[in-house]
Amino acid sequence: MNGVFTVAELDRQLGIPGVARVSEGNGGLARVQITGAFGEGEMYLHGAHVTSWKASGDDEVLFISTKSRWEEGQAIRGGIPICFPWFRGKSDNLHAPAHGFVRTKMWQLESIIENENGISLTMFTQSDEHTRKWWPGEFRLTHRATFGSELRLELVCMNTGTTPFRFEEALHTYNRIANIQDARLQGLDGVSYLDNTELNKVKTQRGDVTIASPTDSAYRNTQNEVDLLDPNMKRRIRLRKEHSLSTVVWNPWSEGAAHLQDLGDGEWRQFLCVEASNILDAAINLAPGQEHRMAALLTVED
């Protein structure tokens, strides 16, 4: 459902025959399926969550857990969840939902537009009685995903209230890889980061990022592109970003995965999260009437 509209009504109003179709997906949740000369994609209204993208002739770029919960009130495990207005746990309320409340919220589908870059889906959500229980900010949050030979994501937050607020945000991208132990991340050499596995101890990256244990690192003052190299799949996933000053790298490893009931056995080996974000000291202050836009662009090369 999208407001008072059914999935069928949304498809009639906004779908593009042969290119973009609104349909029921896993768990009966509404989704938009994209097919074009450039490739394929999928985005759910639940959390405005991108769950699939592959350029023409290429393999799937995003990881989705085989045990993901597809139901209202639960976050989808994998794809690209949106973290807002806080990241990880809420510091002043241990009972608040991890990574904020928009990833488990039903968003509104605003438009589906075909252009020279591919197919752009725009969804939005805004403050209501439920969000005010956890956070006082009055906001409108828009997510625009453009599926083409590249995947471009834009997250725009507007302060619709009369008082300023401060928020964190992340596009929590689960990159699909063959084996975490063989993958490496380039572009962060020499960058200072906070290691959340050691109570946010300050460290400095030396060389490529490789994963050999539970990893939860927030790289600071990062605006440059980073490359995820997967020798087994013979590809490079490149993340470029705009108006993002932190990059999060996360994998739970076997220890953390054992506590995630919505992750299949051994599936922790099949992804590495590399996230455009503004968290911790890069959190955004937004005055009434102002808006902030963060963008992430994914490309795949052999």
Image (cartoon, rainbow, N blue to C red):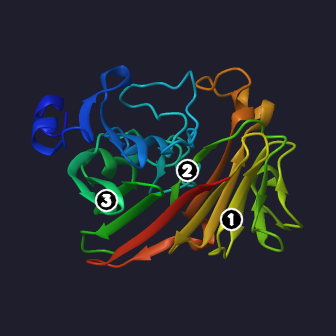
For label 2, the crowd category at 10 Å Cα-Cα, with few meaning under 14, some 14 to 19 and many 20 or more, is: many
Asked which secondary structure carries label 1, the reply is: strand
Q: CA distance from mark 2 to mark 3?
A: 16 Å
Which residue occupies 29% across, 40% down? Answer: 106
- Which of the marked residues, 2 or 1, is nearer the chain's N terminus? 2
Residue 276 in the image, given as x and y percentages of width and height:
57, 62
Amino acid at the residue labelled 1 = Val
Q: Is residue 237 found left or right of 288 in the rendered image?
A: right
* Number of numbered markers: 3
Residue 127 in the image, given as x and y percentages of width and height:
27, 55
Residue under circle 2?
172
For label 3, the crowd category at 10 Å Cα-Cα, with few meaning under 14, some 14 to 19 and many 20 or more, is: many
95 in relation to 224, above or below: above
Residue 286 in the image, given as x and y percentages of width and height:
39, 76
Which residue occupies 28% across, 77% down? Answer: 288
Which residue occupies 16% across, 36% down? Answer: 11
Residue under circle 3?
142
Q: CA distance from mark 3 to mark 1?
A: 25 Å
Q: Do residues under tags 2 and 3 come within 8 Å of each other at their CB atoms?
A: no
Residue under circle 1?
226
Looking at the picture, tell me which residue is in the foreground, 89 or 217.
217
Amino acid at the residue labelled 3 = Thr
**Where's the N terminus, which quadrant?**
top left
162 in relation to 255, above or below: below
